[in-house]
Amino acid sequence: MSKISRRKFVTAGLAATAGVSGVVAAASLARRYGLVPPDSSGIYGPGETLTYAAQRLLTRHSLAREFDRSMISKTPFANEIAPFNDAFKRHQANQFADWRLAVDGMVARPGSFSMSDLRSLPFSRQVTEVVCEEGWSYIAEWIGTPLHEFLKAIGVLPQARYVVYFSIEPDWWESIDMADALHPQTLLTYAMNDGDLPVGFGGPLRLRVPRQLGYKSVKFITRLTVTDSLKSFGKGLGSASPEGGYAWYAGI
Amino acid sequence: MLFDVSDAAELEKSESPRHAVFVRVTHWITTVCFFALLVSGGEIVISHPRFYWGETGNDLTPTLFKIPIPASRNLVPTGYGYVLPDQNGWSRYLHFQAAWAVVLTGILYVVWGLWAGHFRSNLFPAPADRTWRAFLGVIGKHLRLKRPDEGEALSYNVVQRAAYLIVIFVLFPLVIWTGLALSPAFNSAFPIAVNVLGGRQSARTLHFLVSVALLLFLIIHVAMVVLAGFMNRMRAMITGTTITGRMITGATITGIAVATPAGQTEERT
């Protein structure tokens, strides 16, 4: 082996070592600052971590675009939903008079809240776009209780890191980090445009997360859990989406 | 193959590589990423093969154009009686992972290219070639199916230079921009990125059209490589060496000649 190739070999070795230790250091820093998504273990983990970390650093406080009321879609599109289960049908027959949101986990005042409990909290309205991962979109006005107002009312403990929320339909649950949970536009939505939130759009209660794709905005919410770890929920990947092959973080 | 240091130094003088090692490595990383982006992007389009202009668009609104293929979603009115399997989960994961890899590679390539003078010496046309006459001359030669002359095995002609510059400095930046403008979180931090494109659906349509332009470039690029001598051009982009008259005289004593199939030399003279 000539001198030149030995020098090249040593240089390449040093560069590779520096590169690997850089990646290891970056990974441990990212973990410490909560920049690693719960579904980062697979082969797509590096890409997911880069996306989530970059967007968390850039968008922690930024607001989703809001539109003029004149831009509200005349033909909003209610995506396909699985046939309703019996529990939902009973609520539907009763005009959702007994619909409740159960809250547990790392909160000072766990309990169960009726729709009128929610309506008695401060509300906000926003004209934002629903963006589906498939590519289509529509704009609507959404009215409801900001999640941060609700979390304030129930007293979130300081060690909380995620909010997990469940639909009345089986195997339909998601979670968001505290940056999204405390974000002013994250909305426990009960009204849309000029009336109650229609069933097709998630009524009576849908959690709208406007900085992420539509599939994070779970319809028919009945339970909400505040936690510091997602390991014990389902397969520990953060939500039902990664279990079905979709990314946990849907900001892109 | 044994030769000492002084031999190796002399060889390097006589065969400066056709493509620098940095170009070769970034070229093939980009190739792999582009293929991944193309396949996954195509799968994502299949879930909604309808395109719109403006901010919003869905199954209930008129389209700008649609691709006449079946969809992987039940509610898309395609006219076909069946629905393709949903591939969006892994496609989205792969799309963004490949996008990160190609963007980081591209940044390194551009920084290196500026630093090493790659764009100046290899891609920006020489002053004498910056005329429509030179440009049309090359196109005319291609239309008459003339074989490229020997110099073109060592350097790009003006049409190639223009094509590569457009891909590197226009199409790639555009496809990255229009892709980022599809991210609701990115748009919350940089709303101007999507607003100047005319809205979210315009950004999606442009992302698709720029991707089609890149695909057309790829097809012509590969066709040209095949016409110009597939083995030799592939060898140039993999090992860095190419076989020309000049090199054969300088390098027949090296391993390169040994690795060259006998039939490969005839086309170059």
Image (cartoon, rainbow, N blue to C red):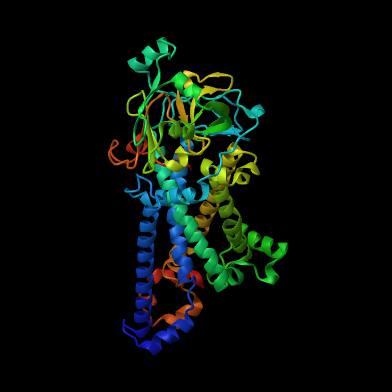
* Residue ID at (50%, 64%): B108
Residue B82 percent coordinates (x, y): 41, 26
Q: Is residue A212 above or below residue A198?
A: below
Q: Is residue B181 visible?
A: no
* Residue ID at (54%, 47%): B180
Q: Nearer the viewer, residue A185 or A135?
A: A185
Residue B245 in the figure: left or right of residue B258: right
**Looking at the image, which residue sits at the far bottom?**
B6
Q: Is residue A75 above or below residue A130?
A: above
Residue B254 percent coordinates (x, y): 38, 80
Q: Nearer the viewer, residue A146 or B172?
A: A146
* Residue ID at (55%, 44%): A62
Residue A162 in the figure: left or right of residue B189: left
Residue A251 percent coordinates (x, y): 48, 42
Residue A100 in the figure: left or right of residue A120: left
Q: Nearer the viewer, residue B159 or B40?
A: B40
Q: Nearer the viewer, residue B139 or A238?
A: A238
Residue B112 percent coordinates (x, y): 52, 69
User: Which quadrant: the N terminus of chain B?
Assistant: bottom left
* Residue ID at (61%, 55%): B170
Q: Is residue B260 above or below residue B90?
A: below
Residue A103 location, quadrant: top left
